[in-house]
Amino acid sequence: MEVVGKVIKVGAKTVTVLIPRGSACAHCGLCQSAGQDSLLEAESLVQVKEGDLVKVVLPDKTFLKATFLVYLFPLIFFIFGYLFGSLLSSIFKSRGEGMPVVFSFVFLGLAFFLLRLLYSKHSSRASAFLPRLTEVVSAFATTGCDYEKERFSSEAQA
């Protein structure tokens, strides 16, 4: 994933970038919504200042790993919770689906708790998922998206 955005805030190790919100961004959750645009925190590999247009890159492998952790890991825990609840239900000769359903949601909560614990905002594991700010681009650079070009080139001229 590559996107061009405008630097809003420069921090010690990270940079906040305003990027156009595309259809692929609708349910990602990696960035915060700012109206039609999104705020994205990225690790800066180059020297930048506020107002610069920059290219932000998130490798596909990293994106797929994050997708697995956010979507499939909890689903796997949910299914194992149901199976564990079914096993306990058969051992205690309990009728109905109550115990499997309860355990499936308990395991789902456990999955999210583990993800939160292992990938807290300031952990080294979480920093591996930060997008990288790779280069400063001019206001008239070809970005592959006319919306991005129009959106940020008009602001850069003003």
Image (spheres, helix red, strand yellow):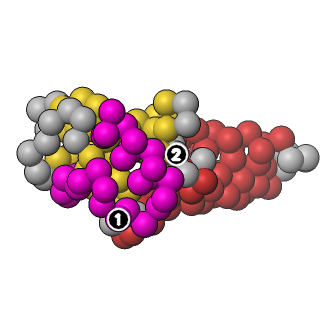
Local packing at callout 2 (Cα closer than 10 Å; few below 14, some 14-19, many 20+) is some
Image location (x, y in percent) of residue 151:
45, 45
Quarter occupied by the C terminus: top left
The residue range painted magenta reads 133-158
**Residue sitting farthest toward the left:** 47
For the residues marked 1 and 2, what is the alpha-carbon distance in whole angstroms? 18 Å
- According to the picture, the residue beneath numbered tag 1 turns out to be 142
Query: Is 154 drawn above or below residue 57 in the view shown?
Result: above
Residue at screen point 60% across, 47% down: 26
Side of 81 where 135 appears, left or right: left
The three-letter amino acid code for the residue at tag 1 is: Thr
**Is 134 colored magenta in this rendering?**
yes
Toward the viewer: 101 or 1?
Answer: 1
Side of 124 where 46 appears, left or right: left
Residue 10: image quadrant is top left
- According to the picture, the residue beneath numbered tag 2 turns out to be 21
Question: Does residue 56 appear in the picture of this structure?
Answer: no
The three-letter amino acid code for the residue at tag 2 is: Arg
Image location (x, y in percent) of residue 116:
41, 38
**Residue sitting farthest toward the bottom:** 61
Residue 144: image quadrant is bottom left
Residue at screen point 35% across, 65% down: 142
Quarter occupied by the N terminus: bottom left
| Mark 2 secondary-structure assignment | loop
Q: Earlier in the sequence, mark 1 or mark 2?
A: 2
